[in-house]
Image (cartoon, rainbow, N blue to C red):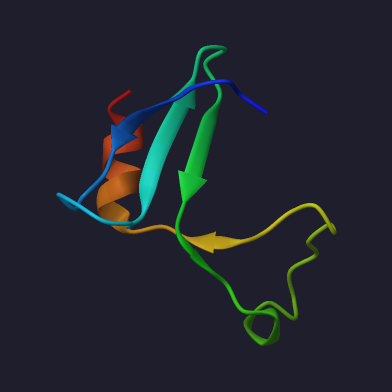
Amino acid sequence: MPEKLEIIAKPCSGGTCPTIYKDEQGRFFLQGNLLQTTDRQDVAVGDDEAVVEIDTSLLDALRTL
């Protein structure tokens, strides 16, 4: 696990909300609303993985990097 995550994009001013982070190795991490198991019947997800919903404003911010 990364030691420190830098906030790259966060559309809200406080609290928790979808966020893009970057670590010191250049890897990106996404925070978003977890897709419920019943909604992802056609998605193969490993036991140590999760599918999250990301707002398009965060994707736009990621594209500019």
The residue sitting at 75% across, 76% down in the picture is 42
Q: Relative to the observer, which residue lies in front, 47 or 56?
A: 47
The residue furthest top is 25
Side (left or right) of 33 relative to 34: left
Side (left or right) of 3 relative to 47: left
Q: Is residue 62 above or below residue 17?
A: above
Image quarter for residue 37?
A: bottom right
Q: Is residue 39 above or below residue 51?
A: below
- In which quadrant will I find the C terminus? top left
Q: Relative to the observer, which residue lies in front, 36 or 14?
A: 14
Side (left or right) of 13 relative to 22: left
Number of numbered discs on residues = 0
The residue sitting at 85% across, 59% down in the picture is 47
Q: Position of residue 7 (x, y in %)?
A: 34, 31
Q: Is residue 48 above or below residue 33?
A: above
- In which quadrant will I find the N terminus? top right
The residue furthest bottom is 38
Q: Position of residue 27 (x, y in %)?
A: 56, 23
Side (left or right) of 37 relative to 28: right
The residue sitting at 57% across, 12% down in the picture is 25
The residue furthest right is 47
Q: Is residue 18 above or below residue 61?
A: below
Q: Position of residue 50 (x, y in %)?
A: 67, 59
